[in-house]
Amino acid sequence: MSTKTATIDPVKLDRLAEVAVKVGLNLQEGQDLLLTAPIAAAPLVRRIAVHAYQAGAGVVTPLLSDDQVTLARFDHARDESFDHAAGWLYEGMAQAFDEGTARLGVVGDNPMLLSEQNPDLVSRASKAQSEAYKPARERITGFDVNWNLVAWPGVDWARLVFPDLPEDEAVTMLADTIFAASRVDGEDAVANWQAHNARLRARTDWLNAQRFSALHFTGPGTDLSVGLADGHEWMGGASLAKNGVVCNPNIPSEEVFTTPHAHRVEGYVQATKPLSYQGTLIENIAVRFEQGRIVEASASRGEAVLQKVLDSDEGARRLGEVALVPHSSPISQSGLLFYNTLFDENAACHIALGQCYSKCFEGGDSLNREQIAAKGGNESMIHIDWMIGSDQIDIDGVHADGRRVPVFRKGEWA
């Protein structure tokens, strides 16, 4: 059965496209747009193209992926294929970003697409992809250009989130959930986002004024001190890219986030939600840090995949992001596991293994790689968020002189 039998509200779909272009990207007149999406998301891609050209876009270039083509590789490709990736494509993307092209990604693929495939082949293909993607990824994590992610209710994704519903009802339900979380179910979605951004800005302003040297997380299975990078800056909602455009990278977005110090994380922490990673559900992650590095790691399910992730490169066992999300966020209150980082990370406070965002520093626009590393920023080929927040987690901000300020109590802003 296809999504054609499901009811995806065309008015709200159009609003999502409008918000992606006007709020997510804040696309500028004459600016080109590079758009990636699953082929099933063509209805949303077409509406995005309409709004982009109405906003004065130069050229909109869509790159569409297909699950069946992905699976064909695992069924029929030669072994050496899995150590290879289309580096030429990502070099081209990097050149496009250097020339000012905006970046928009539509997510909605089947999160468990590769769950039945040989995990060694999945790991090799992922590593090759990560290495090839580096030129483009560096422009994105460095906020060189305005970029944005939005979601499409893919059939397989919907069946995973709503396994007890008939397929068409599951797609309809996921579509409505996406629209609500993306704040496009009201009349003036752009104004809704302006108000939401103002609330997030008030949080980041307060945190930046505090200049905490660390955050201390406590709760069941958790006693974790996350040192913050020197000269770190909190961000959330609308952010200024290096090309001078204010954009909203994630829609939906409930988080405020910054860069931890890669060598100043101590203690232990337990995940509060499963991590869906390349077809594997990794459950009950528990890790211990010493001097910023994970020295012990376990999981009740998917532990072998977790260990492979941690061995990706030198920076994979260190943190590149810490983010604060109240337990009362709309995505958390839905009670759903989305198997998709764009949504699950907005349900709970989280940390990310791997690459830091160089923008999360005072004067980050002008810092080079060596300066970012000297301030404690981490470098890696991966950036993987996993959830550590719940209604039982307390967070204190710790000043350099040891003074403590309540930041979260029982999962809510204090």
Image (cartoon, rainbow, N blue to C red):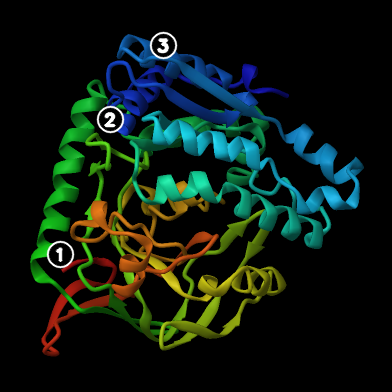
Which three-letter amino acid code belongs to the residue tagged 3?
Val
Residue 230, percent across and down? 23, 73
For mark 3, does the 10 Å Cα neighbourhood hold few (<14), some (14 to 19), or many (20 or more) residues? some
Considering the image in quadrants, where does the N terminus appear?
top right
Residue at 78 percent across and 33 percent down: it is: 68
Q: Are marks 3 and 1 in contact (CB under 8 Å)?
A: no
Among the two numbered marks 3 and 1 on one chain, the one whose residue lies closer to the N terminus: 3
Which three-letter amino acid code belongs to the residue tagged 2?
Val
Q: Are marks 1 and 2 in contact (CB under 8 Å)?
A: no
Residue 405, percent across and down? 13, 78
Res. 301 in view: no
Among the two numbered marks 1 and 2 on one chain, the one whose residue lies closer to the N terminus: 2
Secondary structure beneath label 1: helix
Secondary structure beneath label 3: helix
Q: Nearer the viewer, residue 186 or 237?
A: 237
Judged left or right of residue 125, residue 260 is left
Residue 96 drawn above or below residue 207: above
For mark 1, does the 10 Å Cα neighbourhood hold few (<14), some (14 to 19), or many (20 or more) residues? some
Res. 193 in view: yes
Which three-letter amino acid code belongs to the residue tagged 1?
Leu
Residue 162 drawn above or below residue 269: above
Residue with the mark numbered 2: 23
Residue with the mark numbered 1: 207
Residue 278, percent across and down? 66, 54
Residue with the mark numbered 3: 50
Tell me how far mark 1 sits from mark 2, CA to CA.
24 Å
